Image (cartoon, grey):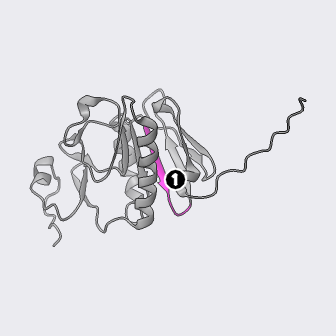
Amino acid sequence: MGLALKKEKYTWQDYLDWSDDERWEVIEGVAYNMTPSPSFTHQKIAGNVYGILRDKLRGKPCTPAIAPLDVYLDDINFVQPDVMVVCDKNKLKEKIYGAPDVIIEVLSPHTSLKDKREKKALYERNGVKEYVIVDPLEQYVERFLPGPDGSYSKGDVFGPKEVLPLKSLDGLEISLWEVFEVEGPEKKLEISTSR
């Protein structure tokens, strides 16, 4: 049974009383239902991104995490990004308290507008160092970095046969063909002229 929304603004305390049967995010006090659950393709892409980050960050100070996991930003802003990386261990408890360094959202038909508009603005305001949107249908990635004034850039777009460098993680690279499970770029054959 769905939650009957009656208030204009919801808080963390309201959220703690809600049923665990449904997933919710609250942005600026507005509740967003996260059901229905994501598609298999969405979960496969999110899992691939998480797996790559987990392998590349093993033994390093930054920790990747995957949804469902609450990120508490303040009393009227708490979300469940698909994949995130946190480099400040003080933010890691049973939930994440404070902005992750990197957030990666995989688009779904019922959440894409919120990911591109409300969540992007929320992450920008809260100092997320790198925001990445993955489109599983069109197979591209868009990355946003803050400029000198803290506002996100217009975004860099990467295709499925390109490498995504994560600037906030010292240029850690993600081969997007591994994320989308497509054939990688053709390697150029180098001919040696030495004898």
**Which is nearer the eye, 174 or 129?**
174
Residue at point 42%, 54% (across, down): 46
Residue 136 included in the magenta stretch of the image: yes
- Residue 96 visible at all: yes
Is 16 rendered above or below residue 137?
above
Q: Give coordinates of residue 40: x percent, y percent.
A: 41, 66
**Which is nearer the eye, 192 or 72?**
192
Tell me the SS state at disc 1.
helix
**Which is nearer the eye, 186 or 23?**
186
Is 106 rendered above or below residue 85?
below
Q: Is residue 157 left or right of residue 23?
A: right
- Residue 116 visible at all: no
Magenta highlight range: 130-138
Q: Is residue 9 left or right of residue 87?
A: left
The residue at which mark 1 appears reads as 179
Residue 59 found in image quarter: top left
